[in-house]
């Protein structure tokens, strides 16, 4: 009767490997395609998905339903509370609709792989063919090996291999064909499914009315919005990307991580579109900004390849085992000051307040705040990793874990442990005129000049204003925090 495509982190119609293959098989058999999207609140809880991200996904699913309806493809939606019941529920739906094949795109975290493995097994027992496809990475995990046949643990040589692999296999970047319109009569047969409503967010993940309205404006959902964002970036901003990407106030990055995370945009689409505007029509050479941007999207693949090869990073373990023995502080007051943006370090506070308000933080600021938590406050980096996941709209396990590992020096290809960012210098360099700080820390808005980076040290008007407005003093003093960090890391590593 039909072929099923199970939508997960691929909430789009265009350039979707498994959906495209489902459509091709359906055409071959003279049948149609049915889409299924299942909300699993237990999965959202277990993976610490933020309310902003849930809302974004639900809004995107609503738009997906409309896009699919234009192709006469129904999207069946349901909530399955217990995630262990999800595989059998999918198979039951397939049986009810006399479906023999289910397609989906693979997710690479251990829980997801185990679920898919179960589906293959249960499906085989029940006469249903389950076809998971590689789609989430531009280069499928496992494709790139060092000369010794191992997974790369350093980005630069991995990146050179990634580019070479794509130049040798350009089909990996080809756009997957759009699904075909379903055959006549399909709509009538599946009428009830076409009338499905998008389920409401679970209570624990619901936004309030003000946030719902604000996030819809800030983060337009769906694949059309995603393609608009990339196109705009590639026509207007990419030329200056390398020179400006580290300056949060310049808003010079693409802001598409939310789309990559929800799958409203394939990383492949981004890389192909960037390649096509490059003067060389390749991934390297040509326009500096294009090359640089492709290199950033590649980080996303890198961290996924790492995750597939070393899945223990999903189990609260640092990539580098030798960092397991660092003795962290468990200081709730400091953690609260960090989460609330009240550390007395204006750049850290501005970044955290921006995250709390917009569910997003610029990459440079993610590095500064992460380093501050792990090194200045000596708090367990996993507390910060979790806080980011529960607040980011683009929360993504592999990239977030990779970023935290990098910044706390415990991860794959990390910043060396003895490199401790000086937040004031970072602030002076990347927010030189304090525009970002003033936008997010109203207490410091009236401070003119460089005093905004460290008002109490500057004295004079800067100090007076900070005091009057109730801006907090530093929770830890930079130099002693740095010394404590080096001592503690060295002791943990047995390098006293
Ligand atoms: P651009 O600069 O326009 O980059 C384009 C795309 O490349 C991004 O959309 C993203 O998909 C990818 N990308 C860029 N930088 C990185 C990177 N360092 N690692 C992996 N992918 C990258 N990114 C997430 O998508 N989800 C996260 O949960 C996440 N957590 C992070 C936590 C920390 C501590 C750090 C240091 C980084 C984290 N990042 C995360 C990476 C990065 O900060 C964001 O991807 C980026 O800020 C998104 O903004 P953009 O789309 O404008 O990026």
Image (cartoon, grey):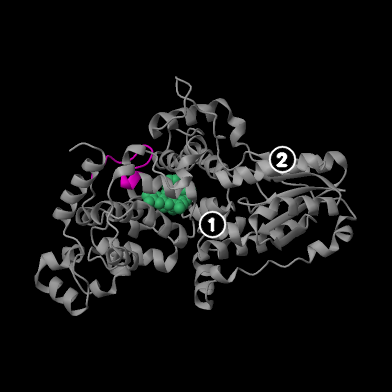
Check disc 1: other Cα within 10 Å, few if <14, some if 14-19, many if 20+: few
Marks 2 and 1 close (CB-CB < 8 Å): no
Quarter of image, res 106:
top right
496 up-or-down from 470: above or below:
above
Horizontal and vertical percent for residue 478? Answer: 17, 56
**Is residue 464 rendered to the left or right of residue 53?**
left
Mark 2 or mark 1, earlier in chain: 1
The residue at the point 32 percent across, 47 percent down is 408
Q: Is residue 447 magenta?
A: no
The residue at the point 39 percent across, 32 percent down is 156
349 up-or-down from 13: above or below:
below
Check disc 2: other Cα within 10 Å, few if <14, some if 14-19, many if 20+: some
Q: What residue would you read off at disc 2? A: 120
470 up-or-down from 148: above or below:
below
Quarter of image, res 209:
bottom right
Q: What residue would you read off at disc 1? A: 46
Question: Callout 1: helix, strand or loop?
Answer: helix
Q: Is residue 417 magenta?
A: yes
Horizontal and vertical percent for residue 186? Answer: 87, 55
Question: Callout 2: helix, strand or loop?
Answer: helix
**Is residue 446 rendered to the left or right of residue 352?**
left
Horizontal and vertical percent for residue 57? Answer: 59, 60
User: Which range of residues does the magenta coloring cover?
Assistant: 406-419
């Amino acid at each position: 009767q039909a072929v099923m495509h199970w939508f997960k982190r691929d909430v789009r119609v265009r350039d979707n490997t498994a959906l495209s293959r489902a459509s091709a098989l359906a055409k071959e058999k003279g049948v149609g395609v049915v889409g299924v999207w299942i909300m699993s609140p237990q999965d959202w809880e277990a993976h610490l998905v933020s309310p902003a991200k849930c809302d974004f996904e639900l809004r995107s699913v609503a738009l997906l339903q409309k896009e699919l309806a234009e192709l006469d493809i129904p999207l069946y939606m349901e909530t399955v509370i217990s995630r262990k019941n999800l595989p059998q529920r999918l198979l039951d739906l397939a049986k009810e609709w006399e479906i023999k094949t289910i397609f989906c795109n693979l997710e690479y975290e251990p829980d997801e792989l185990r679920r898919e493995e179960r589906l293959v097994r249960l499906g085989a027992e029940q006469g249903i063919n389950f076809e998971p496809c590689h789609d989430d990475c531009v280069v499928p995990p496992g494709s790139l090996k060092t000369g010794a046949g191992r997974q790369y643990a350093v980005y630069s040589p991995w990146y050179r291999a990634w580019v070479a692999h794509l130049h040798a296999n350009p089909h990996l970047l080809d756009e997957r064909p759009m699904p075909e319109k379903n055959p006549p009569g399909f709509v009538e047969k599946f009428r009830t499914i076409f009338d499905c409503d998008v389920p409401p967010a679970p209570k624990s993940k619901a936004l309030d009315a003000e946030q719902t309205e604000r996030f819809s404006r800030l983060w337009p959902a769906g694949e059309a919005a995603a393609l608009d964002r990339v196109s705009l970036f590639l026509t207007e901003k990419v030329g200056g990307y390398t020179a400006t990407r580290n300056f949060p106030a310049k808003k010079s990055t693409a802001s598409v991580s939310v789309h990559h995370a929800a799958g409203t945009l394939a990383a492949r689409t981004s890389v192909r579109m960037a390649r096509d505007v490059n003067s060389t029509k390749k991934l390297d050479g040509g326009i500096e900004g294009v090359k640089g941007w492709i290199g950033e999207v590649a980080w996303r693949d890198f961290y996924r390849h790492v995750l597939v090869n070393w899945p223990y990073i999903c189990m609260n373990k640092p990539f580098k085992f030798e960092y397991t023995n660092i003795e962290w502080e468990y200081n709730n007051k400091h953690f609260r000051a960090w989460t609330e943006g009240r550390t007395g370090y204006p750049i850290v506070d501005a970044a955290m307040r921006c995250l709390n308000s917009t569910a997003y933080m610029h990459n440079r600021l993610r590095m500064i705040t992460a380093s501050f938590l792990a090194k200045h406050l000596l708090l367990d980096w996993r507390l910060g990793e979790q806080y980011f996941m529960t607040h980011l709209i683009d929360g993504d396990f592999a990239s977030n874990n990779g970023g935290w590992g990098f910044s706390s020096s415990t991860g794959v290809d990390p910043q060396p442990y003895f490199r401790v960012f000086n937040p004031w210098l970072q602030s002076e360099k990347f927010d030189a005129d304090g525009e970002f700080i003033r936008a997010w820390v109203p207490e410091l808005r009236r401070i003119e000049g460089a005093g905004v980076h460290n008002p109490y040290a500057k004295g004079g008007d800067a100090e007076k204003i900070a005091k009057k407005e109730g801006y907090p003093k530093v929770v830890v003093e930079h130099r002693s925090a740095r010394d404590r960090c080096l001592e503690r890391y060295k002791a943990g590593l047995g390098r006293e």
